Amino acid sequence: MAKLVSKTYGEALFDLAMEEGTLDATAKEAEVVLEVIADNPELSKLLNHPKIVKEEKVTIVENAFKEFLSDTFLGFLTLVVQKDRYNEIQQILQYFLGLVREEKKIGVAKVTSAISLSDAQKQQICNKLLETTDYVTFEMHYEVDASLIGGLVIRVGDKVVDSSIRNRINNMAKSLSKIQLS
């Protein structure tokens, strides 16, 4: 259900921003709201509290964000609160930002390696991804996981390329377990 809500509201915000020609500004506002929510867990508790009436929650949102947001985005946030969907605002805004990235052909890659990569290696990976995809730029996220033993695991969206030694060993173990000795 949450996926449907985030998709519905996220697409509505995206369509509105496209229609008004404010996609970049709206994306920045979404990032600001996500940052404020992450930095202030008390705000989420307050807005999700069942004993606080909607009108008070709307007032809280307006007072908290009116300095930072356009009237359109503030109106969107108050609508989300009025519809009792505030607890899903992070998913809604993440979905919206995903649509923005797709529109601008910005890929998000998560690269996991067994050891820290040098800047040259990171650039080489990014260049290879740009060559082999339709994206014009990438947001790169790097992580180190020593259990890979060696190699890389690269995730772009729902696609995964696993060239890790751990994966190769697991595949060999599966193949060997299928061999029947007579």
Image: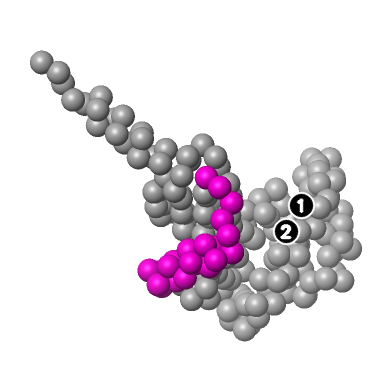
Residue at horizontal 72%, vertical 58%? Answer: 34
What percent of the width, then of the height, locates residue 163? 39, 48
Element under disc 2: helix
Residue 138 colored magenta? no
Q: How many marks?
A: 2
Residue at horizontal 52%, vertical 45%? Answer: 114
Q: Nearer the viewer, residue 15 or 155?
A: 155
**Numbered mark located on residue 101 in the image:** none
Q: Quadrant of the C terminus?
A: top left
Provide the residue designation for mark 2.
34
Provide the residue designation for mark 1.
38
Position of 68 compared to 98: left or right? right
Question: Does residue 110 appear in this view?
Answer: yes
What percent of the width, then of the height, locates residue 16? 61, 75
CA separation in Å, label 2 and label 1: 6 Å
Callout 2–callout 1 Cβ contact below 8 Å? yes
Residue 131 colored magenta? yes
What percent of the width, then of the height, locates residue 148? 48, 40
Indicate the amino acid at tag 2: Leu
Q: Is residue 78 above or below residue 180?
A: below
Position of 79 compared to 107: left or right? right
Indicate the amino acid at tag 1: Ala
